Amino acid sequence: MKKVLIAIPILIIVIIVALSFSLNSIIKKGVETVGPNALGADVRLKDVSMSLLSGKGALKGLFIGNPQGFKSDSAFQLGEVRLALDVQSVFSDKIIIDEVYIDGPDITYEKGIKGDNIRALLKNIESFSGAAQKTGQDKESKEAAASETKVQISNFIVKNGKINMSMSALQGEKLSFALPDIHLKDIGKEKDGTTISKALKEVFAVVNKNIITASAGSLKDIGGTVEKTVKGTVGESVDKLKGLLGK
């Protein structure tokens, strides 16, 4: 009896550890399966480390490529995304994510004649999330949309982000500037939650808005600096010319 009593907690720990490993593989597979379908771009995840005991963990080495038609290597590179889950919700109909914390994302904003890569990703997400409502949709797409896991994200935080702007007008040069910090609350808080693709859509819409605002501000500052430099140079030249002419 004593041996049995000792064995029970050990068995429970073994089960929890096994479930944790399973959860890690499920998350990785989900990201690398749903991600490309929703974004229309390559999505890779190097590693997942989640603990069912604490409900905390991280996604490491998350890479999001670009849709077709864009030349830069990636749209997003996230070294580490920290997560905090409501453990009791993991095996329920709606997974509650208490916090997603992204620190220092590296974002490439590529703008071309036909638009920019971030809006293209957002458009792909919108098409994916609205697929179930479209008429004439194939059976496979309907089943894929219906089977998406429902989630709630209580806090989605992005800090210390860097944007690298790439556009033809810059002739191969890149401009880098800061992404304003982002804090979204209660995504999918409604009773049934929201799908992963719809949550992605909401997040990307806000990220896109912040990128556009930051880009416009940076270009304006750069334009002002260039204008002042040009005016200053021209002014100096005119003054020198007047001096030579004795006027």
Image: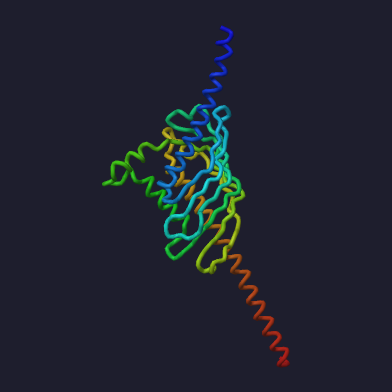
Question: Looking at the picture, how far across and down is residue 89, in whole percent?
Answer: 48, 29
**81 lies above or below 236:** above
- Front-lying residue, 172 or 218: 172
- Residue positioned 40% across, 49% down in the render: 126
For residue 136, side relative to residue 91 (left or right): left
Name the residue nearer the viewer: 224 or 166: 166
Return the residue nearer the eye: 231 or 177. 177
In the image, farthest residue toward the left? 136
Quarter placement of the C terminus: bottom right
Q: At which x and y percent is residue 206?
A: 50, 50
Q: Residue at x 44, y 61 (%)?
A: 115
The image shows residue 236 at horizontal and vertical percentages of 69, 81
Q: Is residue 226 above or below residue 22?
A: below
Q: Quadrant of residue 173?
A: bottom right
User: Which residue lies at the image location 55% right of the left edge and 10% below the top edge?
Assistant: 4
Residue 47: where, in percent of width, then height?
54, 40
